[in-house]
Image: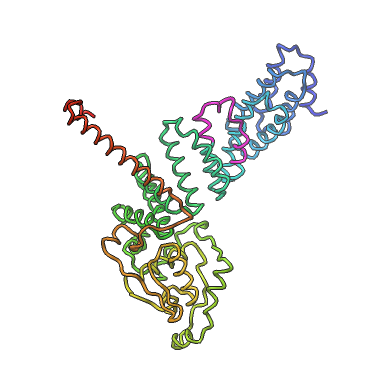
Amino acid sequence: MSTVEARLANLVGVSQKDKGAAYTDLLKQLVAESKPSAEDILKVVNHVVLEDHVGLVVARQVLTELLKALQTDAFKSDLELQKNIIESTLETLQPRVVSYEEVAQALRLQLADLLENEEEWSEAARVLMGLTMDSGRLSNDEEKLRVYVRIVRLLLEDEDSVQAETYQNRAGLLIHSTQDRELQLSYKLCSARISDYHRKFVEAAMRYQELSYAGDLDEQERLHILSASVTCAVLAPAGPNRSRVLASLCRDERTAQLPNYTILSKMFLEHILRPNEVKGFEQTLKPHQLAKIAQSSNDKLASAGGTSMNEDSLEADGESISTRTGPSTVLDRAVMEHNLLSCTKIYNNITFLGLGTLLDLTPAAAETMARKMIEQGRLRASIDQVKRLITFEARDDEEAQGKAGGLGDVDQETEDTGGYFTKKWDHNIRRTAANVETIVQSLHEKGLLSHSTAMTS
């Protein structure tokens, strides 16, 4: 029998009123050693928790003393020892966690801090997920919100945006409960990052830009967030929403300081982007923004259909034709669609071969991209497959103003902003206001309403 086991055996006969002090003193002695032994400390923990004769009150006293000991320099200097004791203690408490809920909560928060410092993001998030949110120190809505936001932030560090969105939705139900500015900003930043990960780039760009105006943040942090907004705006699908975001960013004087300002201004002005400009921008993207995109089988067949046609080979005048059948990444697609729209400012019409050369696609793939954009209402043009020619429709300057390439309203199924219902709501408000004004005017003319009352109304 080891020394610790013998000392524990001797404490069995101690009276109940003295047991708390006796077990606490034993734990203090073990912790005060020059090299505390995790094995000996855990023997005491297991004994007080699992042995019924010790009692719940005494066990809680010992565990509270353990929490204090874990905050001392002896344990902070040995993180592995600290982590080992916390993990083993939580495992011991798990079958009886209801009785030791507050202690278990405190231990989980300490363990999460340790794992976060070691950059084990997902493990730290998993530990926090085990917290009971409706009791103890987390019964307050603001504390729950703080934990949810922390879980979201940790999950996003490991790019687990799917699970992060689940906890972000929970945080959204509690965000009204806090006036803590730092917590509110953390929540908004997490929302922007989740939109970014889910490729809702227009939404992400607007949220990042809003955060970049927050005076509570350091100037460098605001510029970093503004740069993220520019990146998302460039990656967003062409349309009125992106056009508005690009215009807003170009009006912001701070964007001129950013390294990606050139590509931002060229997109806003509808200039054709060259490969070297795109390559420089690509190096600033994060892994999830460089994810590969898949083509449907129909698009693959359509894009490959014209790669071996004789007339295209003759028109190339001995130059090789691209063998690419479509964009491979989100950036590829954004740049190709942008360059295609930019053609409408330069050319009245263009051959499949010419467009394919411009976009670095096969002629058939260029036709497929143009056809899809026409179908979605994002490009005003007609296709003559006999002449292998795309003819662009003329644009009025007034019509083009405020539009993406003068395209008018764009049907984007991927980003439903509820515009129809918003316009309907605005129309109903205007109609109601007009009716109220008519009634008030009528009453005033009939002398049923004084002039001062009408003005107040």
In the depicted structure, whether residue 270 falls above or below residue 222: below
The reply to whether residue 452 is visible in this rendering is no
Front residue of this view, candidates 24 and 254: 254
Front residue of this view, candidates 396 and 172: 396
Front residue of this view, candidates 80 and 284: 284
Tell me which secondary structure the magenta stretch mostly adopts. Answer: helix
Q: In the picture provided, is 377 more to the left or to the right than 457?
A: right
Q: Considering the image in quadrants, where does the C terminus appear?
A: top left
Numbered-mark total: 0
Furthest residue to the front? 446
Region in magenta: 124-147
> Which percent across, then down, holds residue 4?
76, 26
Tell me what residue is drawn at x 64 percent, y 26 percent: 101
- Please say whether residue 146 is one of the residues in the magenta stretch: yes
> Which percent across, then down, holds residue 162?
57, 48
Tell me what residue is drawn at x 67 percent, y 25 percent: 98
Q: In the picture provided, is 437 more to the left or to the right than 305?
A: left
In the depicted structure, whether residue 362 falls above or below residue 83: below
| Colour pattern of the rendering | rainbow
Report which quarter residue 19 is drawn in: top right
Tell me what residue is drawn at x 18 percent, y 29 percent: 446
In the depicted structure, whether residue 418 falls above or below residue 69: below
The reply to whether residue 53 is visible in this rendering is yes
Q: In the picture provided, is 236 more to the left or to the right than 287?
A: left
